[in-house]
Image (tube, rainbow, N blue to C red):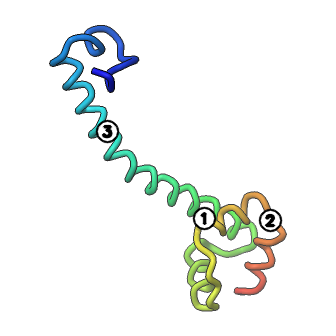
Amino acid sequence: MKQAKGYFGRRKNVWTVAKNAVEKAMLYAYRDRRNKKRNFRSLWITRINAGARMHGMSYSQFMGKVKSNGIELNRKVLADLAMNHPDAFKAIVDRVK
């Protein structure tokens, strides 16, 4: 019942309804902890692709050259550079070209 605190209607004070609502909420929480990782990776790829295309490369070309040149930056860092530090991202693109 403590976990159903804040729910609306019978979900907060009827045992069987609250139990079912909390179990369903736990399933959604478990599933979405994994989906969040998926969504962030997709966002990072989109940002890197936009930054790379501004410099005449596609995402796949850029990432292939980053790996072959031994640059050890992950997608999260590359996406941050592409969005917030375009000069640093341009330096990376120039290095891998």
Q: Is residue 2 above or below residue 48?
A: above
Instruction: Say what amino acid the circle numbered 2 marks.
Output: Pro
Residue located at (19% from left, 17% from top): 17
| Dot 3 crowding, Cα within 10 Å, few <14, some 14–19, many 20+ | few
* Secondary element type, mark 2: helix
Q: Is residue 86 left or right of residue 1?
A: right
The amino acid type, in three-letter code, at marker 1 is Lys
Residue 19 spot, x, y in % from top left: 20, 24
Report, in whole angstroms, how far the alpha carbon at label 1 lies from the one at label 2: 15 Å
Residue at left 64%, top 85%? Answer: 71
Name the residue tied to disc 3: 28
Judged from the image, the secondary structure of the residue bearing numbered disc 3 is helix
Q: Are marks 3 and 1 in contact (CB under 8 Å)?
A: no
What amino acid type should be assigned to the residue bearing mark 3?
Answer: Tyr
Q: Give the CA separation, mark 3 to mark 1.
A: 25 Å
Q: Which mark is residue 86?
A: 2
| Image x and y of residue 73, in percent | 63, 76
Residue 76 image position (x, y, % from top left):
60, 64
Q: Say which residue appears at 72% left-offset and 74% top-offset.
A: 56
User: Left or right of 94: which side holds 80?
Assistant: left
